[in-house]
Image (cartoon, rainbow, N blue to C red):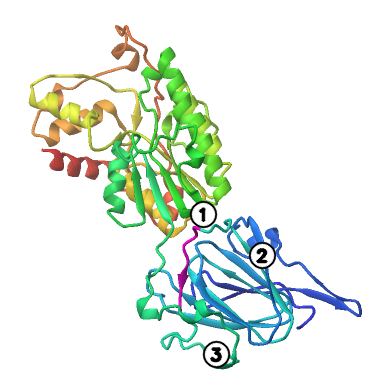
Amino acid sequence: MVFGKSLQRIETTIPGLVLFELPVHGDSRGWFKENWQREKMTALGLDDFGPVQNNISFNDAVGTTRGIHAEPWDKWVSVASGRIFGAWVDLREGETFGTVFTAELDPSRAIFVPRGVGNSYQTLTPDTAYSYLVNDHWSPDTAYTFLNLADETAAVDWPIPLAQAELSEKDKAHPRLVDVVPVAPKRILILGADGQVGRALRVAYGDEPHIEYAARADLSITDPDLAQARHWRDYGVIINAAAFTAVDSAETQEGRAAAWQINAEAVAHLARIAAVNGITLVHISSDYVFDGEAAGAYSEDDVFSPLGVYGQSKAAGDLAVTTVPQHYIVRTSWVIGDGANFVRTMASLAEREVDPRVVDDQVGRLTFAGDLADGIRHLVDTRAPYGTYNVTGAGAERSWADVARDVFRLTGHDPVRITGVSTDEYYSGATAAIAPRPRNSMLDLSKITETGFHPRDGSDGLTAYLRGVS
């Protein structure tokens, strides 16, 4: 063991498997080290993996060999006394399946082993003890994936030949690599999968086996027992596409309660689940968190100033999501997807020879649900920095009346048939509750484009959408 090393992160041949050199301070009395130091480790780029259990393995004899086991959790392995030879094999689905990495560990070295990477250890000195922090509690129902220590494909060069080593009968019986079923990725749960954004997410993610779609009838975010509804440690990402979006109804007594329950209280409950279980939470926000009085496009950092109940409940939900260490808040506006919406209504009126009056003093950009879903998947897949991102269609600002004229023109009808009116004039004779609308719904797209995702121009999206529904 070497005293006085500097803390250092060392990448290995297996993605996510990271070796660390640890500073050990010693004198005539013995030695001391910081075995796990959250602030320093995360500063070196290690995920804050949230350990919940600390285990110790003590081994009497030289040559005691354990593994190769791939567990459904992450672990931090370090030596307390003695020295071990470690062998790690990637048993996860993907191009690196079967990749091997080996190294010796003593008290001045530790390693972070991600979920699904098989790990095994052979003691090189007597009375060796090593500890491991894990981010899930052991259970008798836990499903492991195993690889035989003598697998010819992995071909681990054990310092002490296996014929001379101490092995358990179970470890001797584990399968060869050709018979190992690869460890699937952590599950991605999409809530609100029956809504227009949820249906677009079904298209974006397809039928990959680790994707789970939950409509409200399958799993409601307002369920008081939501924390017990799943074994949440099996999930890596939750995408919350469930929301109360009836902005006018939210101004009624019944609708107000529903808006706050779904958009705020339930989201706060979901955020607690995500934070406790180390899950990345993706939440869809709205331009309605702003009052629309800004002179230009809103950035992700602008202060909330919602005008109505819907916007207030969405702002409260956004604030709850920010408590999750790994979160994406995706703020959008004027969403058009599969189902009843403004564009379909205008196309129907055009076809039926109805000449509508349409508001012309609210401006923004259309966002097509498929583009929004692609933006969400981009953030998750690329592991973009956590935080809030505006995702709408690109292009110049348009009023609702401008959009209506575009729909008429693109469907072969005269856009002059559209009469533009002010918001106040449009709702002047209303007898039901009407929510206040932001006059400016423009959202700045600089941050999302910096991640490499470039939203489609709203005009191009509208042309393609109308072609698909015609």
Dots 2 and 1: beta carbons under 8 Å?
no
Q: Secondary structure at mark 1?
A: loop
Judge from the rendering whether residue 177 lies leftward or rightward of residue 157; answer left or right: left
Quadrant in which the C terminus appears:
top left
Judge from the rendering whether residue 421 lies leftward or rightward of residue 235; answer left or right: left
Among the two numbered marks 3 and 2 on one chain, the one whose residue lies closer to the N terminus: 2
Q: Secondary structure at mark 2?
A: strand
* Amino acid tagged 1: Pro
* Amino acid tagged 2: Asn
Dots 3 and 2: beta carbons under 8 Å?
no
Disc 1 target residue? 385
Q: Which residues are magenta?
A: 141-147
Can residue 66 be spotted in the picture? yes
Disc 2 target residue? 55
Q: Is residue 393 above or below residue 120?
A: above
Quadrant in which the N terminus appears:
bottom right
Which marked residue is nearer to the observer: mark 3 or mark 1?
Answer: 3
Disc 3 target residue? 162
Among the two numbered marks 3 and 1 on one chain, the one whose residue lies closer to the N terminus: 3
Q: Quadrant of residue 130?
A: bottom right
Inspect the magenta stretch and tell me whether residue 146 lies in it. yes
| 3D distance between C-alphas at marks 3 and 2 | 25 Å
